[in-house]
């Protein structure tokens, strides 16, 4: 699943989670997505430096 599709899936989820478990999950999920995009940006930077 691409990042754009992943993001769209996330935005379709309810904005206000009802249970604390869901809140915690969405928070960690957000950080995971952020980490993944950041990692990808670093990879792209490294690749452009090589070329």
Image: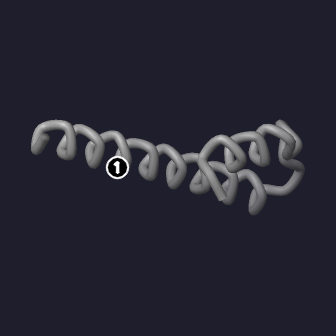
The picture quadrant where one finds residue 10 is top right
Instruction: Give me the residue at 34% from left, 40% from top.
Output: 41
Q: Position of residue 31 (x, y in %)?
A: 51, 49
Q: Position of residue 28 (x, y in %)?
A: 57, 55
Element on which disc 1 rests: helix
Q: Residues within 10 Å of mark 1 (few under 14, many from 20)?
A: few
Quadrant that contains the N terminus: bottom right
The single residue placed furthest to the front in the displayed view is 51
Name the residue nearer the viewer: 47 or 42: 47
Quadrant that contains the C terminus: top left
Q: Position of residue 17 (x, y in %)?
A: 84, 47
Asked if residue 39 lies left or right of residue 29, the reply is left
Q: How many marks?
A: 1
Q: Which residue is mark 1?
A: 39
Instruction: Give me the residue at 48% from left, 44% from top.
Output: 34
51 vs 21: above or below:
above
Asked if residue 42 lies left or right of residue 4, the reply is left
Instruction: Give me the residue at 37% from left, 47% from top.
Output: 40
Instruction: Give me the residue at 18% from left, 44% from top.
Output: 46
The single residue placed furthest to the left in the displayed view is 50
Q: Position of residue 21 (x, y in %)?
A: 75, 62
Name the colouring of the figure.
Answer: one colour
């Amino acid at each position: 699943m691409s990042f754009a599709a992943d993001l769209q899936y996330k935005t379709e989820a309810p904005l206000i989670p009802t249970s604390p478990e869901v809140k915690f999950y969405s928070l960690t999920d957000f950080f995971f997505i952020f980490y993944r995009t950041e990692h990808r940006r670093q990879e792209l930077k490294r690749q452009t430096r090589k070329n």
